[in-house]
Amino acid sequence: MTKRTKPCPICKKPREEDFAPFCSQRCKDRDLAQWFGDGYSLPGERVNPEEIAQQEWDQLD
């Protein structure tokens, strides 16, 4: 019985061990760019960065 691995989540080609879970450095970089460019998101309440900064600043006092 052969073990089937999941395909690359970006292009669906077979995964490469050196770049797992991706097939290449290119797909790995594309995924990272998606995270940096807000292409992915996690469910949750929207936040205002200014409010977070103010809360952190207030904790320092």
Image (cartoon, helix red, strand yellow):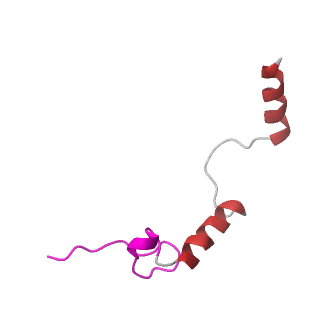
In the image as oriented, which residue stretches furthest toward the left? 1
Q: Is residue 47 left or right of residue 8?
A: right
Quadrant containing the C terminus is top right
Residue sticking out furthest to the bottom? 13
Q: Nearer the viewer, residue 33 or 6?
A: 33
Rendering quarter of residue 36 = bottom right
Q: How many marks?
A: 0
Question: Farthest residue in the front direction?
Answer: 18
Left or right: 41, with 51 as reference point: left
Which residue is nearer to you in this view: 30 or 47?
Answer: 30
Would residue 40 be counted in the magenta stretch? Answer: no
Q: Give the residue drawn at x 64%, y 55%.
A: 41
* Side (left or right) of 3 relative to 8: left
User: In the figure, is residue 35 to the left or right of 51?
Assistant: left
Asked whether 9 falls inside the magenta stretch, the response is: yes
- Residue bounds of the magenta highlight: 1-22
Residue 10 in percent (x, y) is at: 53, 75
Residue at the image point whose x is 36% and y is 71% from the top: 6
Q: Position of residue 35 (x, y in %)?
A: 65, 61
Quadrant of res 50: top right
Residue 27 in picture, x, y percent from top left: 55, 76
Is residue 1 shown above or below 58? below
| Rendered residue at 62%/65% (across/down) | 32
Q: Nearer the viewer, residue 37 or 48?
A: 37
Q: Main secondary structure of the magenta part?
A: loop
Q: Quadrant of the N terminus?
A: bottom left
Q: Farthest residue toward the top?
A: 61
Q: Is residue 48 above or below residue 29?
A: above
